[in-house]
Amino acid sequence: MRVQTGVSFLFALVLACQAKKDYSGYQVLTTGKLSPVQVDALRNLQTSDERFDFWKEAHPDGAADVMSSADHLTALKEFLTKHNIDYSVKIQDVGEAIQISEKPSPTKKSNPNARYNLNWDEYGSHDDFNEFIEEIASQNSWASVRSIGKSVEGRDMKVLELTKGGSGAPNIFIEAGIHAREWIAPAVATYTVKELVENYDSHPEYLDNFNFYVLPCANPDGYEYSRSTDRLWRKNRGLNDGALCKGVDLNRNWEFHWAESGVSDSPCSDVFCGYTPTSEIESQNIKAFYSTLSPVPELTVCFHSAANLWLYPYGYAYDSYPDNVDEIRRLGEDAVDALNAVNGQSFECINSAELYPAAGASDDYYASLGSRFVYTPELRDNGFGFVLPPEYIIPSGEEVWAAWKVMLDKIMPNKE
Ligand code: 0X9
Ligand code: ZN
C-alpha cells in the first residue's frame, strides 16, 4: 500500500513537472499614452518586480502592455492609479487567448503531397523548420544547409544558404525567433524562404542577384520550451551560475554597448543580459557564423513581434545612429508603406531607441559590423500580442513579402 502511494506521488510529481504553465486568470493591461515620468516609473517596476511581464515596454508618448496573474492584478492596478496612468484590459484571460491561438487555423488546408511537415496554417516545431530547410537544400543545387553549432540543450542550429547569386553578390542575413514566445517570427522567415524558392519564376531576380542566409530559429531550446511548457517563455534555457532561474535574454547578450540600457542583472528577469557579453552558446554560434559572411551582409533582418513596428538602429541609446541613417530610414519607410498597403495594417518605421533604449541586441551588433541596412520588424499584434492565432501567419507572410520586394528592388546590384 505504502509502495503504491509512493508510486502515485511520484507519478503526480512527474505529471506536475511536465504540465504546461497555466495562464488562466492572467490579464494583459494596456496603458494610455505615457509621460516621461510615467515611463520611468514603469521601467523601474519592470526591472525591480518580476511579478509583472512587460509585453510591450513603456516609452514616451506610447502605451505599455503589462501582464499580471490574477493574484497580483490589484497591486498592478494600484501602482498604475498611484502614478495616474490610465489603463484598460487588452487580454481578459491569457489562458483562453493561448487556447484560441493553439487551435488549428480555420483555413487549414491539408496537403497529403507536401514534401515537408511545415505549413503556414499552423506554427511549426524546430524540427519542422530544420526539415523544411533541408528539403529546400536537397531540391536545389544552389541551396545548402550549414550547421552553425548546437544550442545549450543540444539542438542543431541550422542556416539555409541560398547562394544562387554567386560569389561577390550582396549577402542578406535573416535571423528569426531569438525570443522564444514570438512564434510569428520563424513562421514569417520560413514563409519568406518558401516565396523566394518555390515562387522563383515570379521573381527570379531575387535569388539570381543575392545570396540569402536564413536562421529560422535563433533560440531553439526556448522555442521548444514555449511549445511544451511555458507559452510565454522569452529567453534561452541556459543555467545561470548560483541562481535557480534559467535563461538569458539572447537579445540583451551581444557585446556592442552590452548592458548599458534596458537590461536586468537578475537571472530571474526576462531581460537578463547574462553575466558577461556573448556568454551564451546560441549568441556565440550566430556571431561566429555571421563573421564568415563576406562581404558583410548588405541587409540584415531580425524578426520579432508584436508591436507593428519596423525598427532601425541603434537601440542602445537615444540619438545614436549609423552614419547612413538617412538611407536606412528612407528604405524602412518605403518598405512599411508597401507592407501596410497589403492588408491595411499600420506599421511604423521608427528608431529602436525611440521604442525604448535596450542594449546588447543582435541588430545593433550587426549594424556595428557594417551591415548597411539592418531592420527589426516587430510583426503583427492584432490585439493578441505574442499569442497570435495561426490564421494570421499567411497574411503576415504576404505583407512582409511586399516589404521584401521594396528592399530587394532598391538594393539590387546595378540598379542604384
Ligand atoms: O526588446 C527587444 O529585444 C525587441 N522587442 S521585443 O518586444 N520583441 O522584445 C526590440 C529590440 C530593438 N533593438 C534594439 N533595442 N537594439
Ligand atoms: Zn523579440
Image (tube, rainbow, N blue to C red):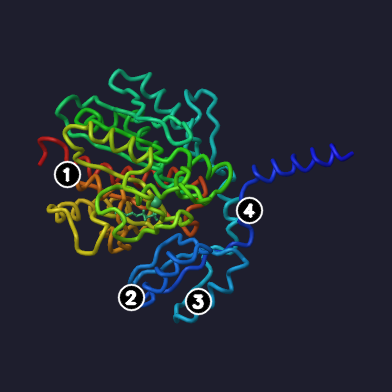
At label 2, counting other C-alpha atoms closer than 10 Å, the crowd grade (few under 14, some 14-19, many 20 or more) is: few
* Left or right of 284 in this view: 320: left
222 relative position to 303: left or right: right
Q: Residue furthest right?
A: 1
Q: State the separation of the CA atoms marked 4 and 1.
A: 44 Å
Residue 132, percent from left and from top: 43, 28
- Residue occupied by mark 2: 36
Q: Would residue 9 appear left or right of 56 to someone viewing this image? A: right
Camera-side residue: 340 or 20?
20
Residue at 35%, 68% in the rendered image: 59
Please say if 170 is above or below 262.
above
Residue 211 x, y percent position in the rendering: 23, 30
On the rendered image, what quadrant is the N terminus found in? Answer: top right
Q: Is mark 4 within 8 Å of ligand 1?
A: no
Spatial CA span between label 1 and label 3 = 43 Å
Residue under numbered circle 4 = 22
